[in-house]
Amino acid sequence: MTVVPRIIIRSALPLICVVPIGIALGAQTPAQQNSTPASAAPQTQITFNRDIAPILFRTCAQCHRPGEAGPFSLLTYADAKSHARQIAAVTKSRFMPPWLPEERPLKFADDIRLTVDEIARIQAWVEQGAAEGNSVDLPSAPKFIEGWQLGKPDVIVKATKPYALPPSGSDNYWNFVFRAPVDRTRWLKAMEIRPGDKRLVHHANVLVDRQQNGRRLEAEPGAGFAGMELTIESEAFDPDSHFLFWKPGTIPYVEPDGMALRLDRDTDLILNTHVQPSGKPETIQPTLGLYFTDKPATKHPILLQLENDRLLDIPPGETQFVVTDQFTLPVDVDLLAIYPHAHYLGKDLQALAKFLDGRSEILIHIPDWNLNWQAVYRYAQPVRLPKGTTISMKFVYDNSDANIRNPNDPPQRVVAGNRAVDEMAHLWLQVLPEISTNAKADPRAEILEAMARHNLQKNREDFEAHYNLAALLMGRGEIAEAIAHFAEANRIRPNEPTVNNAFGAALLAAGRTEESIPHLTAALNARPDYFDARYNLGNALASLGDFRGALAQFQAAVRIHPEDANAEANLGSAFAEIGDTKQARLHYQRALQLNPSNELAKENLQQLSGNPTPR
């Protein structure tokens, strides 16, 4: 038996520094100017209590209240009057409230866009002198739960150690590793991220780490580690599925029944944060609030990503630099949410669905991209996308002086990268595949395979695409093609332990045992506590008749994972092969204690019982 190679799940959603939410005056971009409604002040007296408070309470109060990211509160007449002209200016330009997508037939949940009439009312209110009005007209102020927005969580976990943020620098990324406080499988319906001081933490998302990859990167337990690009491995087929996302003003999302996220014992949660120095030393110690349900997942969404960062090489002065990508769905899906992402040169971002009957529908269009207000957008109703639908992205970038958000003065050449001054061209979509009763394969695997092959058409040097495709092929027994893609992944990253183990396991499964040993050894040289590689190398050595060498590997494997019944059974077999039946019997018995159904331990223990005389 070889250990099935692990599938690498794509890196974290891109994080980039954003400024704190607030109202600010500034120059308008052409798109903002074009979207400005004409002034149409009604003739009747506009008052705060009757006309303006309902608008502010609905669209502004979530951030503009004590303790939140807005620089001032807008919960009272006095608050609003003192900022009345500022409010009129930024709502007229549609700078506030921050809502980037233009209005389209497909509607998003939690749309805070102001209508033309609402903007006109605000203008008229200010022009008429910002009257308060009759107190009986004032609606009740929105009620916010102090502390946790969804009420007290079922479980609260706090970062083990705070992060010491230096007083200066930029593009500072830090990862906090939380040990999920569950002793059995639990179903997570919501998570509230409390990142610490919101002046410092501008953007964050959570990755589910079932193999404790993050722990290996910590200098000491609980210390966390630096970096934006994360690679999460999963021993089983377990693709990314949920947006666990935070930015200022975020309201925690409660998953619908049947779409809870599975948390197992020994699962870690990695909070990937982008922090910005304040000019003095600070400490950050985030907290997660976990809300569970007793309703397990019956629907399994998947995140898919369109991107074409390889094309990002934007010369200075260029105003219409275009990046595109497209992907054809291999199965029927419902589109649940969408997250476009670019940096400061992004200008016009669009995603389109083209159907087999020739129809097209815009999934999202942001004509005036602003990185500071990026968000995950959830559709008010799922969008049906049949098999064969082609999803395309078209991102336009402006690297000229006319782009008021250009971080370079004068403009400079910009390429792809993780820094704020670099660029990205990413479109993430959360889709729910339709599961057919007669389906031969998990539709998520079909999507991942199609995506991997698509990415290799764009770039034959795509490591993740080669690796994930190889792992999927191994899972359905297509070993020869899997070996070819593992070989390519190994060529691109020859010292990557996960690749060397997976490549070795595939060669071993194909009967090419001697070829497998250098790769398995290389995996262990890079990561001595790598259980899978120990186990696979033990099997390889045993196949070649080197039972003492196999014994050493299985002993090491049992030390790493003492609860693994297969490792115990194989260790028993190694002892039996060198003639130590007493130790063999002990390890077979231990294997059966761990798993009474372990056939290898059962059969071999019965054979030993037929010869009760220890050697």
Image (spheres, grey):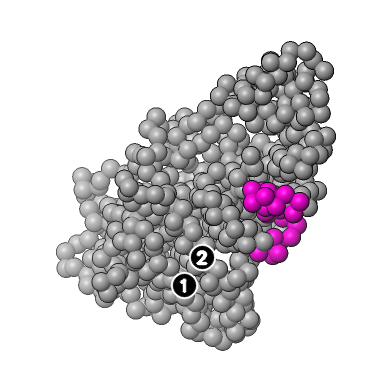
Q: Which residue is mark 1?
A: 325
The three-letter code of the residue at mark 2 reads: Arg
The image shows residue 19 at horizontal and vertical percentages of 54, 61
User: Where is residue 186 drawn, in percent x and y?
Assistant: 47, 31
**Span shown in magenta:** 488-515
Q: Using the image, determine if residue 401 lies above or below residue 204.
A: below
Q: Position of residue 312 (x, y in %)?
A: 57, 76
**Are there few (<14), some (14-19), or many (20+) residues within 10 Å of tag 2?**
some
Spot the residue most to the left.
Answer: 44
**Does residue 231 lie above or below 294 as drawn?**
below
Q: Nearer the viewer, residue 511 or 420?
A: 511
For the N terminus, the quadrant is top right
Which residue is label 2 attached to? Answer: 453
Q: Earlier in the sequence, mark 2 or mark 1?
A: 1
- Magenta stretch, main secondary structure, is helix
- In depth, the one of 575 and 123 nearer the eye is 575
Q: Nearer the viewer, residue 88 or 100?
A: 100
Residue 491 lies in the magenta-colored region: yes
